[in-house]
Image (spheres, grey):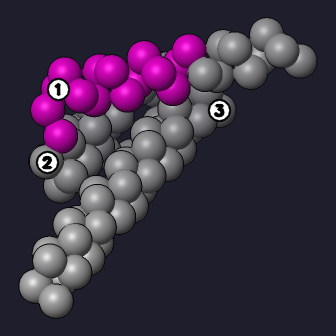
Amino acid sequence: MKNNRQASSRHMDEREKLRKFRELDDAFATALQELDSVGASNEEATPQEPPFEERLKALMQEYDQSSQSVATLMRTIVELRQSSHGAQ
């Protein structure tokens, strides 16, 4: 019974990690979409929104992600967007 609990606990931990990763991925995708729609210039950004870099750092801290893992995620998102645009 103890092994079942440990396996269940590990399974739940993996599910939680996956859920957090998906939330982080969604947040990055949203941020990239906002950059596309608003433009990269800070002049067009609304004053009540923190700059992209601040939002990125806050998300990294909240989800305990290293800059290396975030860079890998960002590259993956960009590559997937480029491949999906190329497929159209």
Three-letter amino acid code at disc 2?
Answer: Asp
Chain part drawn in magenta: 65-79
Q: Quadrant of residue 16?
A: bottom left
Instruction: Indicate whether 31 appears above or below 24.
Output: above
- Mark 3 vs mark 1, CA separation in Å: 25 Å
Q: Position of residue 68 (x, y in %)?
A: 19, 22
Q: Is residue 15 visible?
A: yes
Question: Do residues under tags 3 and 1 come within 8 Å of each other at their CB atoms?
Answer: no
Question: Which residue is found at the position 18% from the left and 83% from the top?
Answer: 5
Three-letter amino acid code at disc 3?
Answer: Ser
Question: Which residue is found at the position 53% from the left and 44% from the top?
Answer: 30
Residue that numbered label 3 is attached to: 37
Q: Which mark is residue 67?
A: 1
Q: Nearer the viewer, mark 3 or mark 1?
A: 1
Question: Which residue is found at the position 52% from the left and 32% from the top?
Answer: 32
- Mark 1 vs mark 2, CA separation in Å: 10 Å
Q: Position of residue 56 (x, y in %)?
A: 28, 38
User: Which SS class for mark 2?
Assistant: loop
Q: Quadrant of residue 15?
A: bottom left
Q: Is residue 9 shown left or right of residue 75?
A: left
Q: Position of residue 81 (x, y in %)?
A: 64, 22
Residue that numbered label 2 is attached to: 64
